[in-house]
Amino acid sequence: MSTQAAIELKNICKRFGPVVANNNVCLTANRGEILSILGENGSGKTTLMNMISGIYFPDEGQIFINGEEAVIASPKDAFDYKIGMIHQHFKLVDVFTATENIVLGLDEGKYNLKEAEKKVQEICDLYGFELDPKKKIYTMSVSEKQTVEIVKVLYRGADILILDEPTAVLTPIEIRKLFAVLKKMREDGKVIIIITHKLNEVMEISDRVSVLRKGEYIGTVNTSETSESELTEMMVGKKIDLNIERTQSENVTPRLEVHHINCSNREGLKVLDDVSFVANAGEILGIAGIAGSGQRELLESIAGLQKLDSGAVLYRNPKTGKMDNLATKTPLQIRELGVRLSFVPEDRLGMGLVGNMDIVDNMMLRSYTKGKGLFLERKAPRDLAEHIIDDLEVVTPDANTPVRRLSGGNVQKVLVGREIAASPTVLMAAYPVRGLDINSSYMIYNLLNQQKERGVAVIFVGEDLDVLLALCDRILVIGSGRITGLVDARTATKEEIGLLMTKTEAMAQSDDEGGEQNG
Amino acid sequence: MADKTAQKVHREPWLHIAKRSEIPGWQAWLIRLAAILIAFVLVGIISSLLTGEGIGEVYGIMIRGVFGRLFEGQFSAKMMWRFLQSTAILLCLSLAVTPAFKMKFWNCGAEGQALIGGLVAMICMMNLSGLPYWLLLVVIVVTSTLAGAVWGLIPALFKAQYGTNETLFTLMMNYVATQITAYYVYLVGKGSGTINPVDTGNLPVLFGAPYLLNILIVAILTVALFIYLKNSKQGYEITVVGESQNTARYIGINVKKVIIRTMMISGALCGVAGMLLVAGTNHSVNTNTVGGQGFTAIMVSWLGQFNAFIMAGMAALIVFLKSGAAKVADTFFLNSSYADIVSGIVILFLVGCEFFIRYTVKIRRNKKEETV
């Protein structure tokens, strides 16, 4: 080889009890290149990187840095080898400034904040980071916090940078900025390893891609010589169709009308500010926005779980045409009204299901009050559980297995299956594919599409804009609790939505119904 | 970096703890059984060191202390009844705290809830002797159950309404109950500190066995509670609220209502235990009537993993250890700490073995470093 590999892994194995997280993984990364580690959730990407950064120690195998065998037994060893990891969940002290966080735990002889600030500024200028060294962490946006994390490892002299899912929490514009910075670092001769499961980003940024599947090393390809479908095949092990079939429903009629709702959190801060929109039957309404912009509160308001300061949630009964206001009702009262509202919440095991109960008992959550008498009727829930296990290919020993023992994808199938089994007229799903493998994700998209074709009003809160654009009919954009836009998913672009996500002022509303209706 | 690589190779420590994947139920029970056996062997060794007798001899004395001379053909029915009666009372209190615990409401007030039930039973027995016997019994049962329920209701109301800490609240309610009882004993006992047993309003004696009714009542409650928690809608609500209040909200369970209702049930069952102690056993009351069993019950409930039938076994085990050890202490002039040591060892093993059910200790296999 002409260039010596900056870092090379040979036959790395790591096991956790019976689970093999990594099996004989081999990797090389060279100076001045960006290497993507691609794999589905649970394929062992993060475990592998944790071994490079000294958090875990490999059971077997060797790590070579600049051609010499390295022993990385602690994060400090990793620093000594100039390896820096930027974790998916930031590890920063909220009340400290950027610089204070950067020098935290660093032994430089003496503590000179002024000097450190200057050095931080130099690093920022060199690579084009936008960062105020004196800004406190708690006032920062997610992307700024990430910048602090990156500058932190650069400050410590890292020249091998590992980024764990760096784009998961960023808006499209922030992602572009991050990529520009990464490219500059590449030119500077740094080694950059990005862990990701987003194909388009892999194609855009990396020079080479290494693929892991279920802990096994599948192979490395040059980005310029591969395609998204080839990478998917490597990742999943078989060819799958990445297209979501979107049909145009006839008979699109308003089902749910949200009128000027306002909602505050426990601290009295406004989390929903004058939100109005219409959800139609036979349509998937997407909700896009930066995480924590009020999506959860919005869905909970409709489900009767949030106390509203003002506003109304009107449900049009498809049989009688009567309008009911759900805003003032509890979930139980909503159900008693005959409103079949299904809700797949973001927090699956903390809200949608009970982890310690088995699948049968979880099926009963919605229906246990049915039937006369004081005692539970487990026959129907058991049938439903068996039915869902068969239909949705839930991998479980049996219907009496506690759901917490199932994998993420199977937990979600149980939850979505139960919510759909209630034959809803409104179906709300918050981040229903988060953490799911590609197969399960597409199964969920198909289920949502089926519901739409059945004439259900589907509300889908998502984070992946590509998916939102491919799946939904209309997309409502929410920013800081306000509706900042409503676009037609068939014509809108990612950039357009990205801009709306970060917009601060509310959309100029032309009519009181909260936007045009897609017919 | 050359100096770095020359460094001694670090490996994982030679012993580390790893979480087990779930093991089958029978294996878990095997571990528990082994723990009890090891605990009994250890208790035997320590006792034999303390007394100078053989291990078999010590256990012989223990069994004699609980059941009489069982193996010498002098089985004591009276001692047997007393053993069952003590087990029944402890079990009743354990059953009482279980629904609350299942709801993750840490009811540490069984002591006070039972005492207030017993006190009310005593007040009825002393002051309503003019009523017909059957009516008096009904009044005693109803009022003492209600008194326990109220004692459970008060902390539940504050918890549901203001989110107060139920552990502290229920503990403080114990002191209130104790002080009220002390005052009543002072009033009635005219400063003597004791109330003589009364013979009005005592629970009936069935088939000449003085504690049979108590035992039957608790047996029925055991079955009832088992079914209530497992198969009733209210039991299901308790589980959901205990596991996740968010889920409960999500499916429209009124969390406050469930907390209040469950604590009233918990308190009411404690009240029944107090009534059994006063009207069915002692026919008198003092501040020590419950005697700390309200706290032992917490342990029984956890050891039994909230399963009413396992709890019955655990209650019997603890009563056996306490009274058996007392007999050993008596025989060899050891002080009362001996009983505590014995039950302490057994409980430590029982609780400690849960660690081995959930975790496994791995010892690193020694292997030769491969050469590069």
Image (tube, coloured by chain):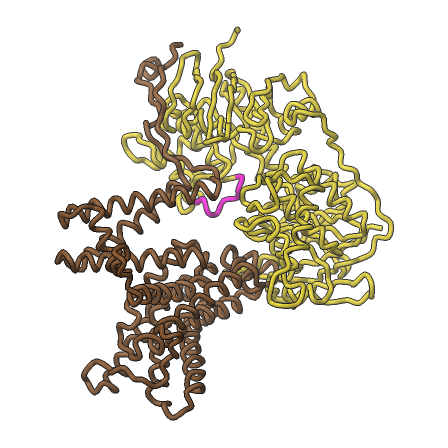
Chain colours: A yellow, B brown
Is A376 part of what is drawn in magenta? no
Q: Can you say which quadrant of the picture contains the C terminus of chain B?
A: top left
Residues B172 and B225: in front is B225
Locate residue B333: give its quadrant.
Answer: bottom left
Q: In which quarter of the image is residue B288?
A: bottom left
Relative vertical location of residue A38 with respect to residue B208 in this rendering, above or below = above
From this viewpoint, which residue is outermost toward the right? A250
User: In the visual, does B62 lie left or right of B149?
Assistant: left
- Residue A140 within the magenta-colored segment of the rendering: yes
| Residue B36 x %, y % | 33, 46
Residue toward you, A131 or A168: A168
Tell me where residue B298 appears, x and y as whole percent.
36, 60
Q: Give the range drawn in magenta.
A: A136-143
Residue B220 in the figure: left or right of residue B168: right
Type of secondary structure dominating the magenta stretch: helix
In the picture as drawn, the residue positioned furthest to the bottom comes out as: B130
Q: Can residue B45 be seen in this view?
A: yes
Q: Position of residue B110 (x, y in %)?
A: 37, 68
